[in-house]
Image: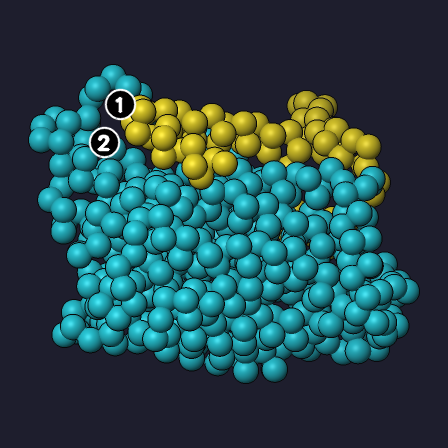
Amino acid sequence: MVALTTPVLIAKSSFGAYYFFAFSTLLCTILCAIFMFETKGHSLEVIEQRYAEGRSSAVQHWAVDGFRLRRLRVDGN
Amino acid sequence: MPSFTQSLGELSPTLHGVVISSSLLTGATTALMGGILADRYGRPRLIATGAVACGLGMAIECAAPHLAVFLAGRLLKGAGDGLFLSTVYVQVSEMSPSRYRGVLTSFPQFMIVVGVVTGFFVCYGTALLPATSASWRLPLGLGAVLALVFAALLRVVPPSPRWLLARGRPADARAVADRLGLGAEERDELLARHGADAALAGHQTLARDLAQMLGEFATALSAPYRARTLFGCFLMAFQQFSGIDGVLYYAPLLFRQAGLASTQAAFLASGVSSLVILAVTVPATLLADRWGRRTSALVGGTSITVLMLLMGTLYAADGVHADSGAGRWVVIVSIYVFAMVFNGTWAIGFRAFLVESLPRKTRSSASSLAQSSNWVCPRKWPVVRSKCVCSEADEGGHSLRISWWP
């Protein structure tokens, strides 16, 4: 579908395709900001367990982590 | 290309598109099954099977006396591709120590880029051969040999310790983990958390296997795994919607619109951009574990959005002219920066995250689904592609498009 419509889009306006790509990328970036957490450096088992623990709110779990860190720093001051 | 039409006949633009995207058809189908078959029969074994199919397909293409035979070879090559591509990442991710996992999971992507660059220059060379069919048969033959060598090398790759555990072979898993240098802590963690998966431990008939395969997709798509599977498919699909392939295939035309002479444009577009991408992939691969997947996704996504808006706005404001003004140079530079950013961030980080975020139970089946969603998306942009391919049909370096683009 998209493969067929995109060339038409490009033919009709040279900028339409660029805007389409820009907004798809933006949407994806926003969703990454919300749902993606860092997996770097953890073993696959630890990652799986964290998902299981924070299951219903994997996101909040990680957001809370960052929040605590900030509060600790404030306390330190 | 003239030698290709000489041996196999003239291709209409539509037929051209069909030939090029034919391997996708079989690829997307076998990609769906690949992961689950790999769970069952062992990952290295399945990767080797896929590579052999791929090699045979290319050998058939190489020797094809007729277009129909060429097409058959291409279908077989696609089936082989689909069978092993997502499994390669799962295997690498599962057998890497967590400290280096990002670097090692990025390595296949790096090698794909090396393949594209090598392919370009091989084809650039063979296109200069006097008018014999060797100019398009030679790269395909080379590809076939490489695929078979790759399959042979897989004999020395051990199965992943996680897979061995799931098959109820903890002693073997322990030995492999030590051999791979997983480190005592990670190894014990691994051995402690995993139990054998009863479904995988026994031998079964093909019919039972197939029934189970459907069951595994159902598992991947049910709670609590559903969110991760769908997010993975979303990531792999939107990797395509950033426009990377569209822009790369369209690049020769874009450059020409921006005022570069045509031969020059074609070379800049294909050769230089592949070298630029290679140059970016090296540090991106090495730094994969410093930077992290989330950072890479956000930085990459933001930069790509800005670049796309910039180019779109320039065109919308009629600021790009073929013969004058700075607009065309901004577009050309933006396309290169876009290719660099994409290959340095999304191309590497998404794949690593995808495999890592999936639990062992659905890692294979959900990766397969994500792989298919990546392929079902307009990866090849067949129509755009056949258009610009035809317009540069006489400019050499061309059979590359047929033989080398994965």
Please give left or right for residue A22 compared with residue B172 in the image: left
Chain letter for cyan, please: B
Neighbour tally class for label 2: few under 14, some 14-19, many 20 plus, Cα within 10 Å: some
Q: Secondary structure at mark 1?
A: helix
Between disc 2 and disc 1, the foreground one is 1
Evaluate whether label 2 is on the same chain as label 1.
yes
Q: What's the mark number on residue B330?
A: 2
Q: Quadrant of residue B398?
A: bottom left
Depth check, front residue: B402 or B186: B402
* SS for callout 2: helix
Q: Chain of mark 2?
A: B
The x, y position of residue B147, in whole percent, is 47, 75
Disc 2 and disc 1 in contact, CB within 8 angstroms: yes
**Which color has been applied to chain A in this rendered view?**
yellow
- A76 lies above or below B191: above
The residue that appears at 70% across and 50% down in the rendered structure is B366
Q: Is residue B194 above or below residue B349?
A: below
| Total numbered circles | 2
Q: Return the chain for callout 1.
A: B
Q: Residue flagged by tag 2: what amino acid is it?
A: Val
Q: Which mark is residue B314?
A: 1
Label 1: few (<14), some (14–19) or many (≥20) C-alpha neighbours in 10 Å: some
Q: Amino acid at mark 1?
A: Leu
Q: Disc 2 versus disc 1: distance between alpha carbons?
A: 9 Å
Quadrant that contains the N terminus of chain B = bottom left
Q: Can residue A4 be seen from the camera position used here?
A: yes
